[in-house]
Amino acid sequence: MGNNTQIPQGKLIVLFDGVCNFCNDSVQRIMKNDKKDRFRFASLQSDIGKELTHERGIDTAQVDSIILIDPGNAYYIKSTAALEIAKRMDGFYPILQIFLILPVSLRDRIYDIIARNRYKWFGKREECKVPSQEEKKRFIE
């Protein structure tokens, strides 16, 4: 990493739209249902978010809501990212991985409709949410 940021070993990194209410609520849901402490978080707007997407050649103009980065250089975008996250969560969420059998083009079309309308349907913040002290441990900067 260019700015000496330490990426935690063996953790999956969820990059999300930090000003989107739906995205912030989703991060809260992931944290609550991540009993095995698999995930770390950063907003796409943060320096680390920009660095991680740039390193992987991800065009954030095309993917501006959620990206899952696996250790190393593997990453998932759009509906595949959401379903890969669900697969690793606790509770009933892993059942959602059944949708991975659907063609990516179909899943991403539905995903894009939600992503395109997320500010209208769920609202937008003026700035990224400030995490609590407990939550801060789960975020990378």
Image: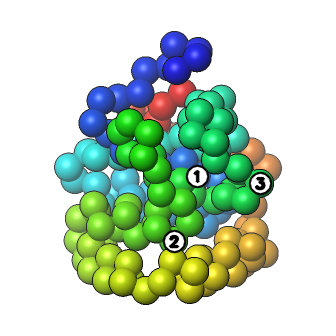
Tell me if residue 111 comes above or below residue 72 in the rendering: below
Can you identify the residue that label 1 sits on? 16
Q: Label 2 near label 1: C-beta < 8 Å?
A: no
The residue carrying pointer 1 sits among few (fewer than 14), some (14 to 19) or many (20 or more) residues within 10 Å by Cα, namely many
Residue type highlighted by circle 3: Ala
Q: How many marks?
A: 3
Q: CA distance from mark 1 to mark 2?
A: 13 Å
Q: Residue at x 65, y 36 (%)?
A: 54
Q: Position of residue 109 (x, y in %)?
A: 63, 82
Can you identify the residue that label 3 sits on? 61
**Front-most of residues 15 and 61:** 61
Q: Secondary structure at mark 2?
A: helix
Q: Residue at x 65, y 53 (%)?
A: 17
Residue type highlighted by circle 2: Ser
Residue 112 visible from this viewpoint: yes
Q: Label 3 near label 1: C-beta < 8 Å?
A: no
**Front-most of residues 122 and 71:** 71
Q: Residue at x 48, y 83 (%)?
A: 103
Q: Is residue 32 left or right of residue 132?
A: left
**Where is residue 85, by image quadrant?**
bottom left
Q: Earlier in the sequence, mark 3 or mark 2?
A: 3
Q: CA distance from mark 1 to mark 3?
A: 13 Å
Can you identify the residue that label 2 sits on? 79
